[in-house]
Image (cartoon, rainbow, N blue to C red):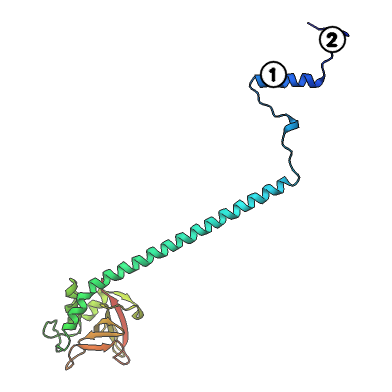
Amino acid sequence: MFTERTATTPLRSPGTRLRRLVAGLVLGGVTLTPLAFAPAVPAGAQSVTVGVDDAARQVAQRRAAEYRRQSELALEKLAALATFFQAQATAERVAPVLDKAVTGLGRPYSRGAAGPSAFDCSGFTRWAWQAAGVDLPHYSGAQWAQTEHIAVEDLQPGDIVFFWGPGERGDPSHVGLYVGDGQMIHAPGTGRPVRYDSIWYWTGAKVAAGRVR
C-alpha cells in the first residue's frame, strides 16, 4: 500500500528516519555505536601502541633475567649445601681412622706385619682403615688398584699416598695415610717406627694419591 504525499503530509527528514531505525534496532536487542560518537583514532596512536608493547616486553625480559639469576643462586646454594654435607659425612667417616692411626705412632716396622704391635706400610693403612669398617688388602699394589685415583693436590685426610721409588715401575712400593697439611703417618721401613712425614719425604719418588670408597 502506498501513501500518497500531499501538501498536508509532512516530509520526513532523513534524520527522523535514521533515529527511528536506530530506535527499532535497539528495541530489537542490537546495540549500535553511532559513528558520530565513535572514539576518534588520535594521530600517532599506532606508534604509542608499539611503544607500550616495547615497554611490556622489556619488563618481561627483566623479570625473566631476574628469575634466571635467582634460579642460579638457588642452585649454587644447593651445591654448596651438598658439598658441606658430603664433607661432613666424610669427616665423620674418616675421624676414627685418623684417631686409630695416631695410636700407632712409635710402633716398630716389621715386614708383613699388620698390627697392632708392629706394621709394614700397607699393613698400617689397612689397620687404620679397619676403624671405619673398611678391609683394605694387605699389599700396596692391591690398595692402589682398589682406591679411587685422585690428584695429589686433591688429597684429603684419610686418603692414601702411594710411592714409586726412582726408576720403579708397576705397583707402588710404599704407602702412607694422609692426615692433612701435606703430612702423612706411615711405617717407613726397617729400623724406622711409625711416624709423621711430609708426603715429599722420599727424594726422587713418584707420588700419587687414592681415595678409599
Q: Position of residue 190 (x, y in %)?
A: 17, 92
Which of 94 and 16 lies nearest the eye of the viewer?
A: 16
User: What amino acid is at disc 2?
Assistant: Thr
Residue 145, horizontal then vertical, whole percent: 26, 75
Which residue is denoted by mark 1 in the rendering?
A: 24
Residue 13, compared with residue 205, is above or below; it is above
Q: Horizontally, is 22 left or right of 81 in the view?
A: right
Provide the residue designation for mark 2: 9
Residue 32, image x, y percentages: 69, 27
Displayed quadrant of residue 185: bottom left
- In the rendered structure, the answer to whether residue 97 lies left or right of residue 152 reads left
Most extreme residue toward the right is 7
Q: Residues within 10 Å of mark 2 (few under 14, many from 20)?
A: few
- Residue 177 higher or lower than 27, as above or below: below
Out of 49 and 206, give the one closest to the viewer. Answer: 49
Q: Residue lying farthest top?
A: 1
The front one of 198 and 138 is 198
Q: Is residue 17 left or right of residue 68?
A: right
Q: Is residue 22 depicted above or below 55 in this figure? A: above
- Mark 2 element type: loop
Which label's residue is closer to the chain start, 1 or 2? Answer: 2
Q: Position of residue 181 (x, y in %)?
A: 31, 84
Is the residue marked by circle 1 packed among few (<14), some (14-19), or many (20+) residues within 10 Å?
few
Q: Residue at x 28, y 70 (%)?
A: 88
